[in-house]
Image (spheres, rainbow, N blue to C red):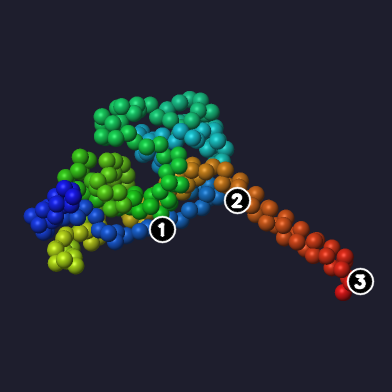
Amino acid sequence: MKRTIILFVVALVSPFAVSATSSDHPQFKADVDVTDKASLQRGARIFMNYCMGCHSAAYMRYNRMGKDLGIEDSILQSNLMFATEKSGDTMTIAMQKGDAEKFFGTAAPDLSVIARSRGADWLLTYFMTFYRDDSRPFGVNNLAFKDVAMPHVLWELQGIQKPVFKTVVTEDGMQHEVIDHLELETPGILDSGEYQNTVNDLVNFLVYVGEPAQIQRKNMGVIVILYLLVLLVIVYMLKQEYWKDIH
């Protein structure tokens, strides 16, 4: 009851309060193809260079990733292994949980199953919708994840976006400022299409990390379906032969 009263008072004294996100923010559709090894290799490079400073993928081993993605051990060790020299190690980081909480306010989550938890489309939307927000500790906010504690680590690739607001009137006559769309304020190294393709490669890699065996599972599924179709023909012919004298 007390909370309801507080919210009502806030609404009365703040009729033009700015909403952090719009309820109808753009949703991006990820193009996921875990059989595209070139995309997975590019995504692995982005993950190692931009994500793994804070995030681990502790359920994945370097040598398993190298084998699945067709990366030779020498290239794997010289370009994608920064935290260890043993290819059989899991993809963990040196940052301690306590240090992460001190730096960011919360420990950075392990990303081994983030794609299975959040979904590929959500992840792509998340990486695409960072925007400048000077009220936040790292100067950015996110349409998909309100008041996110993570800095925009890919800002030099995408550039810096700013929110463009619009005024909406609710059913009770209250006016609110909501984000209508995001506008590029400072260009990045990549144009918008190149950046989305880069992020899509990263999302594709995270989908693979969430279930590395899915490549073999899907291939095996195709073989099993073909086997069952052949078996269906054989069984049907046996049925015809068995019942021919009766019919």
Looking at marks 3 and 1 on the same chain, the residue that comes earlier in the sequence is marked by 1
Rounded to the nearest whole Å, what is the CA distance between mark 1 and mark 2?
22 Å
Whole-percent x, y for residue 23 in the image: 27, 59
Residue with the mark numbered 3: 245
**Badge 3 element:** loop
Q: Is residue 88 visible?
A: yes
- Residue 198 point in image, percent of width and height: 40, 49
How many residues crowd mark 3 within 10 Å: few (<14), some (14–19), many (20+)?
few
Which numbered disc covers residue 29? 1
Q: Residue at x 43, y 46 (%)?
A: 117
Q: Is residue 242 left or right of residue 188?
A: right
Amino acid carrying label 1: it is Lys
Dot 2, how many residues are within 10 Å of its Cα: few (below 14), some (14-19), or many (20+)?
few
Residue 210 spot, x, y in % from top left? 48, 43
Asked if residue 194 can be seen in this view, the reply is no
**Quadrant assignment for the C terminus:** bottom right
Q: Residue furthest bottom?
A: 247
**Gap in Å between the C-alphas at discs 2 and 3?**
42 Å
- Res 99 → quadrant: top left
Q: Amino acid at mark 2?
A: Lys
Q: For this rendering, which residue is in front, 165 or 74? A: 165
Residue at the extreme right of the image, as rendered? 245
Which residue type carries mark 3?
Answer: Asp
Residue most extreme to the front: 1
Which is more toward the observer, 120 or 4? 4
> Measuring 16% from the left and 60% from the top, which residue is drawn there?
176
Q: Position of residue 203 (x, y in %)?
A: 43, 48
Can you say whether 21 is above or below 106 in the image?
Answer: below
